[in-house]
Image (cartoon, helix red, strand yellow):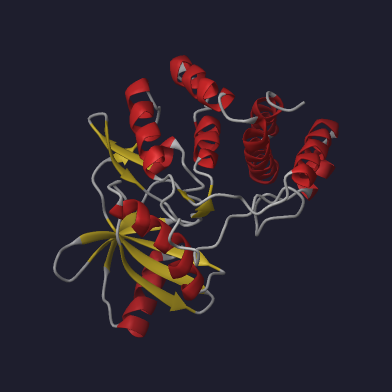
Amino acid sequence: MDAERVAAQLAEEAGVRLVVEGPCAGGQVGAAFVRWPDGRRSVLKWRPGTRLEDLLAGPVAVSEAVRAAGAPVPETQLAVQLGSAIATVQELLPGAPITELDSDGLDQALAFNELQAGLLAERPDIPSLALFLREDGPGFCLHGPLRAHNRRTARLDDWITTVGAEHPGPLRGDDAVHVDYHPGNLLAVDGTITGIIDWDGAGRGDRRLDLVTLRFGVHGDKPDSTVVARLDAVLDGFPDDVLRPLWAHMSLRMVDWAIRHFTPAAVDHWLALAEARTD
């Protein structure tokens, strides 16, 4: 994201003049800290290939439902269509991204996940999420890279598409689902989670997808073994017909992304985790 250009477009299209302070750390598309004329600080984000009505009816509606339930979710203060992209300005919450989730942080993350249960039961207008187990996702969850990379990744894709045939989508359930629930999207101050950010892909479905995502998210170079064991125990308690499609989705998502964007060592890193629960 070219933050200065996006801020200039916002000034022209919406009459909102924001001062860009600098980029936020992390993220694949980019975000920047901005300041309103009255001195308030917020976060400017840019999402290409998105329609405003889809964003408001999906991710923004989900995040607002979770925020209303008591979770520390940033308010969307502004959303404007800029050509084929959307610029959003979101509330800046206190805290810094968690670099390594410990047991206390896991307790909080699990509690916030419980808040998401059934939140969208009265919102049938919010779309259900797709897992893309038999077809490609929009720029992620691509099957071709797994088919072409090597025999191991091709075998993984065979397993993923088999699971997809057994469990055709979309994802069932009326829970709010974050979709990218990993430690880097959890802000904390002195060990207390103060923000859950980056709801850009959120939708309706089964909140347990976020716990599978979290399990992949703690699969770092030196993960906390206690946290890993506790999360594995949580996942072991899921019914097989719930866990298999959720695990297949995250396996596809992470291995595909690693093939296309990271090193061969990173591919092996994610592939080893993915294979841990295939049969």
Q: Residue furthest front?
A: 122
Percent from the top left, x then y, of residue 1? 46, 62
Percent from the top left, x then y, of residue 89? 33, 65
Residue at horizontal 75 percent and vertical 54 percent from the top: 135
Would residue 221 be visible to someone looking at this image? no
Horizontally, residue 278 falls left or right of residue 18, namely: right
- Against 76, residue 266 (above or below) is above
- Quarter holding residue 23: bottom left
Q: Nearer the viewer, residue 147 or 199?
A: 199
Would residue 75 be visible to someone looking at this image? yes
Horizontally, residue 6 falls left or right of residue 144, namely: left
Percent from the top left, x then y, of residue 20? 29, 64
Residue at horizontal 47 percent and vertical 57 percent from the top: 200
Residue at horizontal 30 percent and vertical 50 percent from the top: 69
Percent from the top left, x then y, of residue 129? 58, 55
- Quarter holding residue 110: top left
Q: Nearer the viewer, residue 78 or 19?
A: 78
Q: Nearer the viewer, residue 279 or 29?
A: 279
Q: Residue furthest left?
A: 38
- Against 152, residue 205 (above or below) is below
- Number of numbered callouts drawn: 0
- Quarter holding residue 146: top right
Horizontally, residue 145 falls left or right of residue 212, namely: right
Horizontally, residue 270 falls left or right of residue 235, namely: right
Quarter of the figure that contains the C terminus? top right
